[in-house]
Amino acid sequence: EAGVTQFPSHSVIEKGQTVTLRCDPISGHDNLYWYRRVMGKEIKFLLHFVKESKQDESGMPNNRFLAERTGGTYSTLKVQPAELEDSGVYFCASSQGGGGYEQYFGPGTRLTVT
Amino acid sequence: GDSVTQMEGPVTLSEEAFLTINCTYTATGYPSLFWYVQYPGEGLQLLLKATKADDKGSNKGFEATYRKETTSFHLEKGSVQVSDSAVYFCALRSDYKLSFGAGTTVTVRA
């Protein structure tokens, strides 16, 4: 069974440009999460989907970030326009259920904004 | 809010040395506690977990005990190998949301 996949693995863009990150969860996992690690610091929660619905987007830093999960399958995270402080590693995770279910993480997308 | 503080790295050890990475947490209620590991070029993997006080999680020779009285979940391994070189993250979960520490980079030399 395929794990969580993320694309691209690395993206380098200039300040002010737009970038879209993609996450494909494990098949059958209704719960999908985005996290990010900035500047080698702690990994922070961004948001949580259940199927196509956003359950919690309390960690989204500002309105330059837009996450979608059309059809309840893969998810995208768009940053528009990107700023220098958005550089970091963006992780996606999925789980069968919420609460006590294990979250399986993808390899992450390293975003560098220059 | 919930938070996790873990020992800053980097940590460099010789093979067969003893490894300890300290982790303390602040949380309301009774969170579950985790250690995740990220090997070079790979994603985060769950290393071990404990869901209630005094539980001991163990895997691949690593151990950690949920200490409610000291709000700690220190990771230990008695004899590390080169293949244990990785970044280790302590985390807690309240409901579905994971809160992580900053990560500790461990390098094991042959």
Image: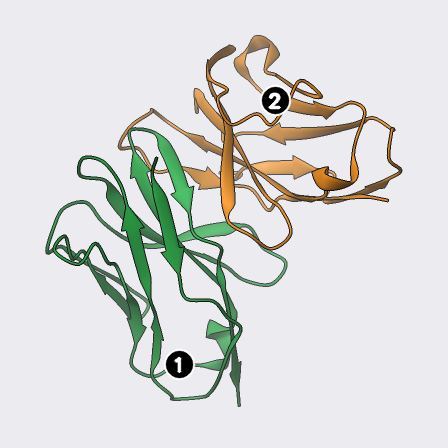
Chain colours: A orange, B green
Q: Position of residue B19 (x, y in %)?
A: 36, 78
Q: Is A97 located above or below residue B71 in the figure?
A: above
Q: Residue at x 49, y 29 (%)?
A: A33
Mark 1, residue position? B80
Relative horizontal placement of residue B32, taking residue A103 as reference (left or right): left
Q: Which mark is residue A114?
A: none
Q: Secondary structure at mark 1?
A: loop
Q: Is A13 located above or below residue A78 in the figure?
A: below
Q: Residue at x 27, y 48 (%)?
A: B33
Q: Position of residue A109 (x, y in %)?
A: 68, 42
In the rendered structure, which amino acid carries the disc numbered 2? Answer: Ser
Relative horizontal placement of residue A70, taking residue B77 as reference (left or right): right
Q: Position of residue B31 (x, y in %)?
A: 23, 40
Q: Name the quarter where the C terminus of chain A is drawn.
A: top right
Relative horizontal placement of residue A110, taking residue B107 as reference (left or right): right
Q: Is A49 located above or below residue B1 in the figure?
A: above
Relative horizontal placement of residue A98, taking residue A11 as reference (left or right): left
Mark 2, residue position? A75
The image quadrant that residue A106 belongs to is top right
Q: Chain of mark 1?
A: B
The number of callouts visible is 2
Q: Secondary structure at mark 2?
A: strand
